[in-house]
Structure formats: structure tokens, C-alpha cells
């Protein structure tokens, strides 16, 4: 479905962020990208979504180069949810989701009854039907994320790309959103690519985990293989214990301690001691 061939990426004022990456994402697969901060995860997603042109190499959808698609044709195939999507607070849920139909509208730009049917279908799948006329500002974090996923579904994409969709959500909403995405991936056979920071969530929901470090793919494979690979400790600079989640049949990590030195500088700090002041009586 998706091929990344020898792709190098960067921005105008920076050196290469992604360096000669090769990846194949299979049709219907749910792949999760993990890696330390600054490893190039979001940059790679932007390029796959068509928002950043490679300095070298190419990205293909079904063996056709991304650069050969028009913006409209690409939006009919790829739905991309960035890390911090924004919408005017007075938009209703239904109005937001309706924007997912724009790539499919005819030259008149008018919505047809079939478009509204698809919007209703997307709301039903994401359990938002009763929220249709509610302003986005009145929604919880998890409900907002579901609305954005519904917008993406209304595009009827072949590929769904999400950059840290659980950011700022509490644990309950994180699982609500990820369980929804996993369910839609399997039910609709949508090829799904997600960036996550939580290694245990990656292990729980991914068909395959891809590990980036310093702009390069250093590991990829099934969750059990990746989580049990000792390289993760050096990549993330943590010491971990590894167990088995028998309920979900996947491995899990127990972070034990950081391997990073919090304070550098050695002898510069040896003579420093905290100043103590008396509390007023």
C-alpha cells in the first residue's frame, strides 16, 4: 500500500532530519512509529501526508509516486490528523466532520445527500450521533479526538495517519481513542500509521512497531520482538523490566530508572549546598 524508498527529509534552515529511510506499510496494517524526542517521527508523517517534499527518494501509494497526485486526489486517499488540530469553537461536531467531504465534492462545491449520509455514517462509527449539533468547545478531550477521527473517516481514505492522537488525554480517553482507531482499522481495512510516545500502548495496539533514532529506522517488527529487544533501553536511555500482558496477549514494559545524568558539569556543583531559611513563626 505505502512505500518509502530511500527518503531523506529536512527543512530549509536545518540539516537532514530523516536520513535514507526505507519502509513498506502493508494494506490494512496498523503500524506505530516510536522513538525519542527529535528522532524525526512527525517529519516523516508530514512527508507521507504530502506536506513536505523529500530532498531525496520517493514515497509511493500502490506503486504510484506521491508527487504525481493532485492535492485533491491525495486527500481522497490519505487522511492526516496532526498533533494539535484546531477548529473555531463555535463549529458544531457535524460542521467539523463535513469538511472531510471536501476532497470528494464536484466543481460546484455543493454537498449532496450521499455526502451527508457518509457524515452520518462517520458519526455513528465514532459514537457521536447524539453530539451532532453540539459546539466543539463543549466537548471533552476524548470527544474532540473522536470528532477529528470522524472527519478523517468522512474522507473515506485508504490510509489514515495520526500524529500523537492521545496527547493531553487522561488514561481513560487515551484508550478510548486508540481502541476506536484499532477497531476502525480492522473493520474498514484502513491502512493506519500512528506516532505514539507510550511504549506500552504501541505494544498493545500495533501490528508492527517502527523505531526511529536520529532520523533513521533502527528497529522494526512485531511488538513482542521489539519490546523484548534490549536496544530499546539504550535508545530511550531507561532501564526497564519486561512482563507479559496475558489479558491482551502482548508484552509490557516497566520503567525502572532513567539512564541519563540529570546534572552535568561534575566538580562545578560539589561545593554547592541548598540555602535554608527559617519559616516565620
Image: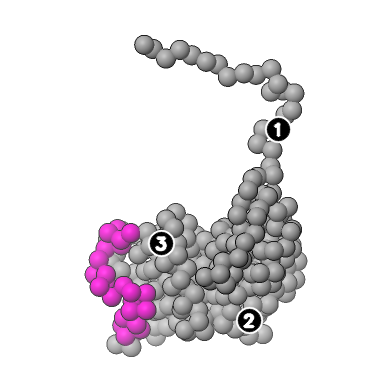
For this orientation, the residue located farthest to the bottom is 114
Q: Which mark is residue 26?
A: 2
**Total marks in image:** 3
Marks 3 and 1: in contact by CB < 8 Å?
no
Quadrant location of the C terminus in the rendered image: top left
> To which residue does mark 3 refer?
173
| Secondary structure found at label 1 | loop
Residue 245 placed where, x, y %?
A: 56, 66
| Secondary structure found at label 2 | loop
Residue 186 placed where, x, y %?
A: 50, 82
Other residues around mark 3 within 10 Å, as few (<14) / some (14–19) / many (≥20): some
Answer left or right for 209 relative to 119: right
Q: Which label lies toward us, 1 or 3?
A: 3
Residue 79 placed where, x, y %?
A: 49, 74
Q: Quadrant of residue 124?
A: bottom left
Q: Quadrant of residue 44?
A: bottom right
What whole-number distance in Å separates the C-alpha atoms at marks 3 and 2? Answer: 28 Å
What stretch of residues is rendered in magenta?
Answer: 115-140
Residue 73 seen in this snapshot: no
What whole-number distance in Å separates the C-alpha atoms at marks 1 and 3? Answer: 38 Å
Q: Mark 3 vs mark 2: which is more N-terminal?
A: 2
Q: Residue at image x 39%, y 68%?
A: 146
Q: Which mark is residue 264?
A: 1
Amino acid at each position: 500500500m505505502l512505500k518509502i524508498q530511500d527518503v531523506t527529509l529536512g527543512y530549509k534552515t536545518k540539516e537532514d532530519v530523516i536520513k535514507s529511510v526505507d519502509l513498506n506499510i502493508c494494506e490494512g496494517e496498523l503500524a506505530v512509529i516510536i522513538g525519542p524526542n527529535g528522532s524525526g517521527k512527525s517529519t516523516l508523517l508530514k512527508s507521507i501526508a504530502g506536506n513536505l517534499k523529500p530532498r531525496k527518494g520517493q514515497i509511493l501509494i500502490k506503486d504510484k509516486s506521491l508527487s504525481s497526485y493532485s492535492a485533491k486526489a491525495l486527500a481522497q486517499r490519505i487522511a492526516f490528523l496532526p498533533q494539535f488540530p484546531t477548529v473555531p469553537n463555535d463549529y458544531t461536531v457535524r460542521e467539523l466532520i463535513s469538511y472531510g467531504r471536501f476532497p470528494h465534492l464536484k466543481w460546484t462545491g455543493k454537498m449532496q445527500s450521499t455526502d451527508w449520509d457518509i457524515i452520518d455514517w462517520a458519526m455513528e462509527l465514532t459514537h457521536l450521533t447524539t453530539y451532532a449539533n453540539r459546539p466543539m468547545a463543549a466537548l471533552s478531550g476524548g470527544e474532540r479526538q473522536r470528532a477529528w477521527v470522524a472527519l478523517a473517516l468522512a474522507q473515506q481514505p485508504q490510509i489514515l495517519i495520526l500524529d500523537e492522537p492521545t496527547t493531553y488525554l487522561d488514561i481513560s480517553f487515551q484508550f478510548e481513542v486508540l481502541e476506536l482507531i484499532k477497531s476502525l482499522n480492522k473493520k474498514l481495512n484502513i491502512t493506519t500509521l500512528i506516532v505514539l510516545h507510550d511504549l506500552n500502548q504501541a505494544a498493545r495496539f500495533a501490528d508492527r512497531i517502527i523505531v526511529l533514532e536520529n532520523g533513521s529506522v533502527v528497529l522494526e517488527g512485531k511488538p513482542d520482538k521489539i519490546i523484548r529487544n534490549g536496544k530499546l533501553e539504550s535508545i530511550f536511555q531507561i532501564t526497564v523490566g519486561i512482563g507479559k500482558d496475558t489479558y491482551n496477549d502482548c508484552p509490557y514494559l516497566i520503567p525502572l530508572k532513567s539512564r541519563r545524568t540529570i546534572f552535568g558539569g561534575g566538580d562545578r556543583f560539589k561545593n554547592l549546598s541548598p540555602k535554608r531559611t527559617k519559616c516565620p513563626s
